[in-house]
Image: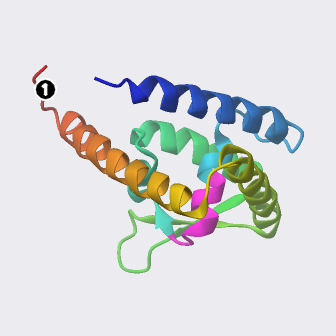
Amino acid sequence: MITILREIGTIARALDSIANVECKQHQLARGQYLYLVRIAEQPGIIADQLSKLLKVDRATVSRAVSKLVAQKLVVRQTDTQNQRLKHLYVTELGRARADLIERENQYSERVAQAGLSASEQAQLKQLLERVAKNVGADWEQVKAGRHREY
């Protein structure tokens, strides 16, 4: 069996490390850039949706969002139909930071895919989407309290 997860993990850790160093100069703590960009991409998203999108628990989302709110990068707006739901939106400052992070992401994409043809890039994207779907389904099962059979 080919161990692709080690390579995926190495790539993810390297890019996360780079992003954390570069985002620090913009007063974004470790990993906050992920939340900010996803909120900017999906205005009005709620914490539960963000949790599923990023594959992290709701408590982690809550802490990260609270920090972004404190930094005036994100605002919470109560749903008009359901007072328990809080929709998340980036502020103008948050939008500016998200745009900067998106430029960093595009640069990292170019570096990561250097030397790959357009068809190789498309194939890689398709394969990684399939892997993410498989892992996502497993994540959903484990979060629901089920145990995996090894």
**Mark 1 — residue?**
147
Q: Residues within 10 Å of mark 1 (few under 14, many from 20)?
A: few
x and y percent of residue 34 in the render? Answer: 61, 48
Which stretch did the figure color magenta? 36-44
Is residue 16 shown in magenta? Answer: no
The image quadrant where one finds the C terminus is: top left
User: Which residue appears at 57% of the width and 25% of the height?
Assistant: 10
Name the residue at the bottom extreme: 80
> Identity of the amino acid at label 1?
His
Nearest the eye: 116 or 10: 116
Name the residue at the top extreme: 150
x and y percent of residue 95 in the render? Answer: 76, 66
Above/below status of 73 relative to 10: below
User: Which residue appears at 48% of the width and 66% of the height?
Assistant: 45
Nearest the eye: 63 or 130: 130
User: Which residue appears at 66% of the width and 42% of the height?
Assistant: 32
